[in-house]
Image (cartoon, rainbow, N blue to C red):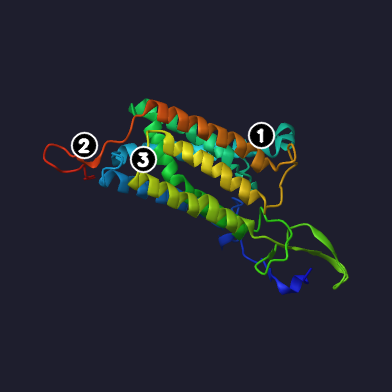
Amino acid sequence: MATPTNYWVHDLSPFLVRFPENPLGLEGIRYYGLAYLAGFIVAWALLRVYNNRGKYVIDADARATLMTAIILGVLAGGRLGYMLLYDLDNFLAHPASIIRVDQGGMASHGGFVGVILALVWFAWRQNRSLLELGDIVTSVTPIGLFFGRIANFINGELWGRVTEVRWAVIFPDSPTVFDRTTLSYAPQPRHPSQLYEAGLEGLLLFIYLQFRLWFARPPFGQLAGEFLFGYGIVRIIGELFREPDAGLILGLSRGQFYSIFLMLAGLVLIVLARLRGQREPSLEEKLDPHGEQHRETN
């Protein structure tokens, strides 16, 4: 293996701004928090575009309510999911640790469950089609995953497996081995798997879902099913390059194992959607008697 000095050593700070010591114990503004903020802002903006172009009519008040529900679902589901799926022993020993979000620990699978519950509530409250709403929300979800994975890379966490590829990165906090060249223990070069996942879970899925949303008319619910199935596939692929951050289950990383259930749920949703056969109206059907589509005025 090439010597560690041939590779870039990760030295990025997790803070955009670091605060001086203060009575409140606030450390600073983290990129991880900004990633969540960026994802929510882009999702809000895309929902407005959908409204203005007649893809999904949702005014400013309803959009604000939906985004609030989604934010709460992501944060609560992601944190609870991490504690139950990846850190159960610590959770049972210290239940209060679930509120220590400053210590990190969010699970995308748990976040999905939280968002589903938020969508069920919003659809019931607003008397909207849950399947259509699911299609719309999943079409913007990958951009949040993209920002989150970029933040994982900046934080130097969730690193990849040991490798000799030229673009490998040395993460100082990763496990060390004895280096005969330097006669000391040092971390090994690893795949920047966070960037792979940003491309697969984020950009690839986002482009695919946007294409399907604008240029196809699948039955309500099918797009959400395709997202769940597609996420499961790319997550399993990404995990091939990622160092498992918890014990294996049946020889699979936990990310791979839990993704199987997402894929199954996606397949079920696709089948149900096709059996129902309810599709998005065509552009002509959306036009009002005056021949103008709905435009947001507030």
Most foreground residue, 63 or 167: 167
Q: Residue at x 46, y 30 (%)?
A: 271
Q: CA distance from mark 1 to mark 3?
A: 30 Å
Which quadrant holds the C terminus? top left
Q: Earlier in the sequence, mark 1 or mark 3?
A: 3
> What's under tag 3, amino acid-wise?
Ala
Q: CA distance from mark 3 to mark 2?
A: 27 Å
> What's under tag 2, amino acid-wise?
Glu
Residue 67 visible in image: no
Q: Position of residue 112 (x, y in %)?
A: 53, 37
Q: CA distance from mark 1 to mark 2?
A: 46 Å
Q: Earlier in the sequence, mark 1 or mark 2?
A: 1
> What's under tag 1, amino acid-wise?
Leu
Q: Which residue is mark 3?
A: 64
- Residue 263 versus residue 17 in the image, above or below: above
Most foreground residue, 29 or 225: 225
Q: Would you call the spot at circle 3 few (<14 residues within 10 Å), some (14-19), or many (20 or more)?
A: few
Q: Position of residue 263 (x, y in %)?
A: 56, 37
Most foreground residue, 36 or 178: 178
Q: Which residue is mark 2?
A: 285
Q: Residue at x 36, y 29 (%)?
A: 277
Please tell me whether mark 1 sits on a helix, a strand or a loop. helix
Q: Residue 84: which disc?
A: 1
Residue 215 as seen in the image, left or right of residue 262: left
